[in-house]
Image (cartoon, rainbow, N blue to C red):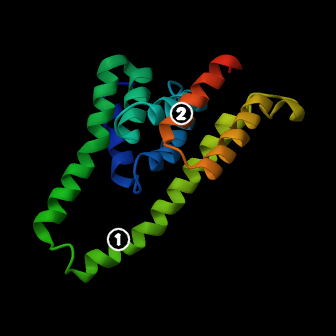
Amino acid sequence: MNLFGLFFEFSKIGLFAVGGGLATLPFLFHLAEKYAWLTVEIIGNGQALAQSAPGAIGVNMATNAGFHAAGVQGSLAAVAGLVFPSIIVITIIARALAFKENQLVQAVFMGLKPCATGLLAAAGFGVLRSSLFNSEAFVWHEMLRPRECILFAVLFALIVKLKLHPAVYIGLAGAAGVILKL
């Protein structure tokens, strides 16, 4: 894929991914269906990397996907495309409207909250599917990844029960991945 194509595809994602970095995942899954350079496995690995690396998740995901498409230049094009619409939209809104007092702006944001929730839920289900299920399995009993499911259940229980800093769980998951050879 050429650099302009990457910029354009990620500009569309940046324009419509309301709700932050995880909201880009449904769009990335759509790209994986459209282009051979991006797969569900790359998205899953990239998501894990983006969650554990410093920086914005959406930018980290764009960097990873762009790199798989066209190397370092692809990363730069994807990131530029992702952030460009936000810069333009926020600049226009900031100049044209007073946020706190304008009822139209408040109504738009109230409408965007359910949209962001839906995008984040879709992203969560997509990550769950790519992490715990083997989409390439031909036999139904091989579709589930048992070690990953156990790790998910244990980490989920620890997160709910202990409420420690997220870095602790990231470290535990990374160590478990090495130990279990995931």
Q: In this view, does 180 lie above or below 146?
A: above
Q: In this view, does 144 lie above or below 101?
A: above
Q: In this view, does 132 lie to the left or right of 43?
A: right
What amino acid is at disc 1? Phe
x then y, percent, for residue 35: 51, 30
x then y, percent, for residue 110: 39, 74
Separation of disc 2 and disc 1 at Cα?
A: 32 Å
Helix, strand or loop at label 1? It is helix
Q: In which quarter of the image is the C terminus?
A: top right
Residue beneath the point at 60% across and 30% down:
173
x then y, percent, for residue 167: 48, 36
Label 1: which residue?
109
Return the disc, 2 or 1, that comes first in the chain's sequence. 1
Residue beneath the point at 35% across and 71% down:
109
Residue beneath the point at 33% across and 33% down:
78
Helix, strand or loop at label 2? It is helix
Pick whichever, 177 or 94, lies toward us.
Answer: 177
x then y, percent, for residue 85: 26, 49
Q: Can residue 39 be seen in this view?
A: no
Label 2: which residue?
170
